[in-house]
Image: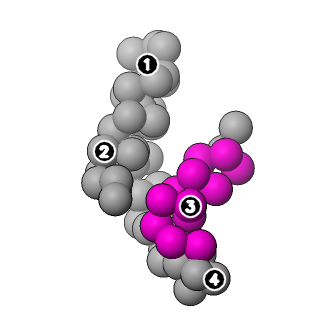
Amino acid sequence: MWNRLEVFRSAIGKCESATVRKDVASLLPDFKSKMMEAIDRLKWLDLGYDRAVSTLLNLSH
């Protein structure tokens, strides 16, 4: 099972620009709580955690 915080850190690490990285980091607390809520809702659909995370990451592209 993935560490939830590492998923978000990894996403921020993929940003190329330091400015973008700073902007994204400032949004992280709210984004993180929304993503956690979405993941928890998807788990109710019996997708499982890894599947829920990969589904959300695919939707963000």
Residue 30, quarter of picture:
bottom left
- Residue 41 is at least partly visible in this image: no
| Residue 21: image location, x then y, percent | 41, 26
Q: Quadrant of the N terminus?
A: bottom left
User: How many C-alpha atoms fall within 10 Å of the one at disc 1: few (<14), some, or many (≥20)?
Assistant: few
Q: Give the mark nearer the N terminus: 4 vs 3.
A: 4
The outermost residue toward the bottom is 44
Residue 45, numbered circle: 4
Which residue is denoted by mark 1 in the rendering?
Answer: 19
Q: Quadrant of the C terminus?
A: top right
Q: Is residue 26 left or right of residue 35?
A: left
Q: Residue at x 63, y 82 (%)?
A: 45
Kind of residue sitting beneath label 4: Leu
Residue 51, numbered circle: 3
Kind of residue sitting beneath label 2: Glu
Dots 4 and 2: beta carbons under 8 Å? Answer: no
Kind of residue sitting beneath label 1: Thr
